Amino acid sequence: MKPFVLLLQAAVQDPAVDAAPLPFLERVYAGTTARDWIIALCVFAGAVVLFGLLKRLTLLRLAKWAERTETDLDDLIVDLVRRTSRFYLIALAARLASHWLVLSETTHDWLTRATILATFIQVGLWGVGLVQYGLARLVKDRAQEDPIRTMGSSILGMIGRGLVWITVLLLCLSNLGVDVTALITGLGVGGIAVALALQNILGDLFASITILLDKPFVVGDAIQLGEFTGTVEQIGIKTTRLRSVNGELIVVGNSDLVNSRIRNYKRLTERRCVFTIGVTYSTRPEHLEALPAILAACVEATPETRLDRAHFKSFGDWALIFEVVFFSVRPEYNAMMDAQQAINLKIKRRLSELGVEMAFPTQTVIYANSVAAPTPPAR
């Protein structure tokens, strides 16, 4: 009897007899039960679908809103939402589903880093969108009439995108545990060496970007640069080309343009004109009193002009000087000269009617009567 009892106890304590098969949902895989794996997969799939639907619905709502507004800021928001990539949504869904999993510390750390990397890349995509938005506003309505500006904006866009992605790369390397201090130092030293070697070229390049952003002139403007005057034909990366009134081509470095005082005649809203006339000293006083009003009336009767003043200015060497100031509403030089010509003809006609003579340089020489010397007496 005792051997049978011992055999029964051994059978009860045998693991093969004690280990009954577990249900599938309770089985453990990689430290997590099958039930939690299924929940995590359902959460992941649901989050991917939900994020995609939210993105699509947001784009539809924002697009309808942007059509009803005149500002382009809503277009920027639509573009940024459209640039939200699918892999970023998948990374967020995976991060959300990981809360139902039992992960080791190493796996959890790598999953966190992957999520941060995806976030940095997504921020880079948004940054590129902001750069393109700024450049689009810069060349808005100028793509056809100003191709040089479009070329300059493309160069500026390349520089902007490069800066965005270099920043993203450094952030990603830092997140992966790479010491980027030495890399940044090396890039800085290399950049200084390149800048010193190409300082003149880079100076003109950044000057062209300054001209592009500040817009002191555009292609087609008539400008004066020191002793040179001409019409802007081309704004390049290094130089700007002017066509002078005599026909020759003037090539100026962009850095010289930025550091110089420029007169832009194309930006004139109206052109100020000053001229004088002289009448003879024999003019009657009543005519002298009436002349300022007559001159003003001649200016006011000329189309596209605006009178400023008309005065008896001074007593000249050979004439009585009257000064007239007016503005040509059309700032073009030819239009100003047409107005000046019409005013001159009116003044000449009106003075002829009054009998007032216009003076011209004259000189009066007065000879004193000489007294004859007495004849000496004859001897």
Image (spheres, rainbow, N blue to C red):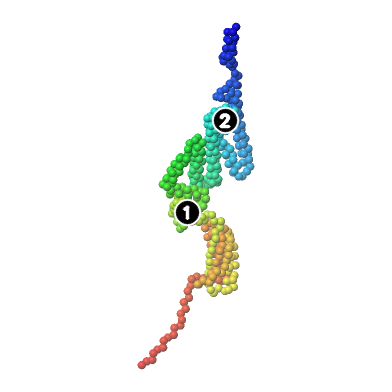
Residue 117 % position (x, y) = 53, 35
Residue 215 % position (x, y) = 52, 50
Is the residue 290 above or below the residue 196 in the image?
below
Q: Secondary structure at mark 2?
A: helix
298 horizontally vs 225: left or right: right
Location of the C terminus (image quadrant): bottom left
Looking at numbered disc 1 in the image, what kind of residue is underneath it? Answer: Asn
* Residue 12 visible within the image: yes
Q: Residue at x 50, y 42 (%)?
A: 163
Nearer the observer, 160 or 36: 36
Q: Residue at x 44, y 41 (%)?
A: 186
Residue 374 % position (x, y) = 41, 88
Task: Name the residue beneath numbered marker 1.
Answer: 259
Looking at numbered disc 2 in the image, what kind of residue is underneath it? Answer: Ala
Q: Residue at x 56, y 37 (%)?
A: 83
Q: Which is closer to the viewer, label 1 or label 2?
A: 2
Instruction: State the separation of the CA atoms marked 1 and 2.
Output: 56 Å
Nearer the observer, 367 or 338: 367
Residue projecting furthest to the left: 379
* Residue 45 visible within the image: no
Tag 1 near tag 2, CB within 8 Å: no
Is the residue 174 above or below the residue 1 in the image?
below
Residue projecting furthest to the top: 1
Going from N to C along the chain, the mark reached first, 1 or 2, is: 2
Task: Name the residue beneath numbered marker 2.
Answer: 94
| CA neighbours of label 2 inside 10 A, class few (<14), some (14 to 19), many (20+) | many
Is the residue 331 above or below the residue 176 in the image?
below
